[in-house]
């Protein structure tokens, strides 16, 4: 190998491979794969690098030492070994990905990219941005991008190198040259805290630390925080409710697939008194550790203290040859049958359909299809259909699924909606998530349509459209300057909304002579503007803002629109 670029701060191994391809000047990625791995192109997973020994052999020094260094400095395996027991035995790539919940997407921070180009003269992929559950940059607090803002093309290429951050998207969009407003990417403080905690753990976790003592550490911390049931047990319901209040059900549903599907019966099963394998995925364990400790150094110190108290099983400093290679699969008829049985069990256990299997277990599904086993795919479909049909019938027949406090929660949601919509302070948008967050009474579950039909209906009834929210916010800004002669730009700036849309709403409210006094909802209703309002100019196309902004160089003055039915 002529050269291989040195690692930049927090750079992933997949990024170094992509930079090698660009700096080497290879015309096709196939040439790069053959030079580095001696194989045809494959997916460059941020979690688990296939054929890593082939790359290590082409580097100077000891093979095993090279493998360990590449893994610890360039992949996510150090943090996955800490939060999931499935990686403690050097399991196959498919099993590790399933247990960890790898997103299958490469993410970037536009602000980091600009700073990297200025400092290192090249863009690169940050390893900390690829951690499951991380949706924001810990340094800048910007939301991470996994696709092109213009055409939606994913940054990660299937079974190939991710070159878009350096070469731009296929549509011509250049990430490092993008002119964007920070307001379009600002993440919540909770998302930034998660990113900071995860990045510090990844950077400072010792090489040999495994997940064996994690349940004990989390359990003891939960008891210290007051989540106690009886003498020694963890009050899991109270712990779950506290996490919902801290993170919000919306964010948990985005980060935890089981929570999104309301499968939380065994959410913290591994916190029991019995010793067993960690059953929760990396995302849930990481969220729990972040909530209980709030500080990465304290968390790692507690783990180290627990290790010192008793026997501790560590990972092999040097794994056996080919330990990182995917488990070989028999491609005979018997091998296909085993794959079919395995995927059928996964589909039943995790309530997946064929589309989910193709997304999460693409390799196994493809092997079944290549083997010509159409009957195997059809058998999978039948098993999944039978599995999904049975619960549906039960839910229709049984009223026991409805939570006994559904009606009480629905009434509280209505009271919260009335209070928030009539509040004279700076308006926030009334959505299902904001209603749930701002209602003090809340069972330890998200109001799904099965267990909480009345609550769900109340949330939907009192949700407001984006345009109605714009109207309330602009009216609030007008009220701040009521009786004064001020420029329209000052009001739209105080509103903190997208300029052109806010300006149109302002002129529309002025044309209706809406009185800018609280309660704003009542004033809007008097002029026919209700919660489902579709805006002052339905059908009007506005300039793309934020990530979709394109600089033209032309300066045009804002012209108030002519509203339908008004002079």
Image (cartoon, rainbow, N blue to C red):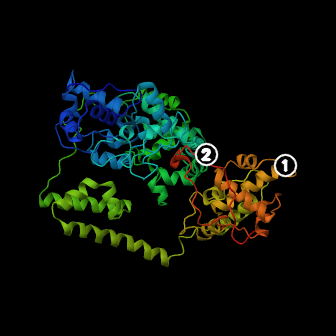
- The span from disc 1 to disc 2 (Cα, nearest Å) is 26 Å
Which residue is situated farthest in the top direction here?
61
Q: Is 235 displayed left or right of 345 in the figure?
A: right
Left or right: residue 255 versus residue 371 is: right
Q: Which of marks 1 and 2 is nearer the N terminus?
A: 1
Residue 273, can we see it? no
Residue 328 visible somewhere in the drawing:
yes
Displayed quadrant of residue 447? bottom right
Name the residue carrying label 1. 485
Report helix, strand or loop for mark 2: loop
Q: Position of residue 220 (x, y in %)?
A: 52, 38
Horizontal side of residue 493 vs 142, given as left or right: right
Residue bearing mark 2: 555
On the rendered image, what quadrant is the C terminus found in? bottom right
Quadrant in the picture for residue 528: bottom right
Q: In this view, does 495 lie above or below 73?
A: below
């Amino acid at each position: 190998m002529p050269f291989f670029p040195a690692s930049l701060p927090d750079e992933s191994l997949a990024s170094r491979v992509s930079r090698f391809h660009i700096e080497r000047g290879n015309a096709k990625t196939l040439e790069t794969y053959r030079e580095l791995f001696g194989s045809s192109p494959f997916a460059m997973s941020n979690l688990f690098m296939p054929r890593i020994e082939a790359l290590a052999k082409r580097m100077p020094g000891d093979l095993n030492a090279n493998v360990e260094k590449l893994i610890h400095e360039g992949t996510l395996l150090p943090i996955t070994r800490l939060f999931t027991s499935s990686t403690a035995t050097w399991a196959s790539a498919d099993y590790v990905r399933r247990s960890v919940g790898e997103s299958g997407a490469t993410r970037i921070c536009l602000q980091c990219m600009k700073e990297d180009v200025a400092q290192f003269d090249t863009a690169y992929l940050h390893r900390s941005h690829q951690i499951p559950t991380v949706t924001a940059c810990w340094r800048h607090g910007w939301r991470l991008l996994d696709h092109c803002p213009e055409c939606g093309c994913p940054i990660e290429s299937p079974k190939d190198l991710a070159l878009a951050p350096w070469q731009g998207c296929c549509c011509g969009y250049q990430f490092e040259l993008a002119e964007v407003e920070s307001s379009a990417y600002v993440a919540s403080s909770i998302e930034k805290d998660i990113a900071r905690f995860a990045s510090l753990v990844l950077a400072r976790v010792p090489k040999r630390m495994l997940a064996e003592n994690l349940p004990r550490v989390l359990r003891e911390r939960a008891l210290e925080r007051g989540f106690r049931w009886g003498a020694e047990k963890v009050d899991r319901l109270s712990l779950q409710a506290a996490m919902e209040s801290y993170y919000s059900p919306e964010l948990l549903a985005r980060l935890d697939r089981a929570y999104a599907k309301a499968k939380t019966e065994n959410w913290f099963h591994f916190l029991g008194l019995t010793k067993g394998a960690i059953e929760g995925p990396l995302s849930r364990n990481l969220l729990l550790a972040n909530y209980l400790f709030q500080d990465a150094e304290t968390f790692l110190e507690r783990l180290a203290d627990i290790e010192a108290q008793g026997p501790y099983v560590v990972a092999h400093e040097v794994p056996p040859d080919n330990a990182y290679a995917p488990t070989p699969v028999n491609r005979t008829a018997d091998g296909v049958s085993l794959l079919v049985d395995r995927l059928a069990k996964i589909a039943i256990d995790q309530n997946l359909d064929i589309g989910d299997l193709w997304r999460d277990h693409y390799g196994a599904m493809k092997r079944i299809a290549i083997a010509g086993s159409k009957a195997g795919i059809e058998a999978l479909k039948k098993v999944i259909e039978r599995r999904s049909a049975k619960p549906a019938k039960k839910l229709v027949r049984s009223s026991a699924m409805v939570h006994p406090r559904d009606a009480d929660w629905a009434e509280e949601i209505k009271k919260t909606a009335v209070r928030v919509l009539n509040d004279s302070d700076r308006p926030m948008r009334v959505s299902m998530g904001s209603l749930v967050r701002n209602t003090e009474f809340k069972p330890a579950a998200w109001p799904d349509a099965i267990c909480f039909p009345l609550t769900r209906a109340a949330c939907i009834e009192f949700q407001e459209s984006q345009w109605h929210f714009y109207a309330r916010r602009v009216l609030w800004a007008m009220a701040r300057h009521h009786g004064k002669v001020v420029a329209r730009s000052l009001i739209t700036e105080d509103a903190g909304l997208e300029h052109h849309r806010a300006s149109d709403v302002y002129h529309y409210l002025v044309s209706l002579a809406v009185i800018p006094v609280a309660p704003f909802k009542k004033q809007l209703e008097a002029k026919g503007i209700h919660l489902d309002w579709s805006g002052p100019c339905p059908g009007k196309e506005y300039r793309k803002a934020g990530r979709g902004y394109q600089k033209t160089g032309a300066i045009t003055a804002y012209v108030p629109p002519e509203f339908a039915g008004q002079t």
